[in-house]
Image (spheres, helix red, strand yellow):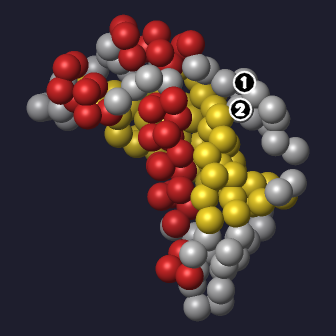
Amino acid sequence: MIQDDVFRWTLRIYYEDTDAGGIVYYANYLKYFERARTEWLRHAGINQADMAGQHQVMFVVKSTSIDYHLPAQLDDELVIITGIEKMGRASLVFVQQAWRRDQRLVSARFKVGCVNTQSIRPCEIPAPVMLSVKMNKFPQLN
């Protein structure tokens, strides 16, 4: 079951999301998770355009692992839940899951690094951004 104290973002599955078999094309979950992380950052008070403009940093995905448990289909309403498993000086590890009602469909882990916008080299997450992340860190997902 989905915990009560996690960040949730809801989406609907449209025809364009499905493959010839009528189920969600596997790569689309990467897009759903990316959008949910963006909404999580926005909820935490972090605007990525401002972060790039004011601090000259941005987040990039360094690695991911994903497990597919059950398929989503046309017209399903999914809830994407997002939490942070680990925070480093220059990276965050997000844990995300896609749910349909009480069924976990997909589980994923994303390591996201902070890089300088000019050099694209790793750098520390700016203090104001880190504070916002710490204040909005949700419990680890099961």
Q: Which mark is residue 58?
A: none
Q: Is residue 60 visible?
A: yes
Residue occupying the far left of the picture: 118
Q: Which residue is mark 1?
A: 139
Residue 117 percent location from the top left of the image: 18, 32
Where, by quadrant of the figure, is residue 62 drawn?
top left
The residue that appears at 72% across and 24% down in the rendered structure is 139
Residue type, label 2: Val
Quarter holding the N terminus?
A: top right
**Labels 2 & 1 near each other (Cβ < 8 A):** yes
Q: Is residue 37 left or right of residue 85?
A: left
Neighbour class for label 2 at 10 Å: few (<14), some, many (≥20)?
Answer: some
Residue matched to label 2: 6
Residue in the picture at 36% in, 8% down: 127
The CA span between labels 2 and 1 is 7 Å
| Residue at figure coordinates x 50%, y 24% from the top left | 44
Residue 138: x, y in percent? Answer: 67, 24
Residue 22 shown left or right of residue 142 in the figure: left
What amino acid type should be assigned to the residue bearing mark 1?
Pro
The residue at the point 66 percent across, 78 percent down is 74
User: In this rendering, is residue 115 above or below 39?
Assistant: above
Question: Where does the image place residue 24, in percent across and percent down from the top left?
Answer: 62, 74
Point out the frontmost of discs 2 and 1.
2
Q: Camera-side residue: 142 or 37?
A: 37
- The answer to which image quadrant residue 58 occupies is top left
Q: Is residue 57 left or right of residue 135?
A: left
Dot 1 lies on which element? loop
* Residue sitting at the far bottom: 20
| Mark closer to the chain start, 2 or 1 | 2
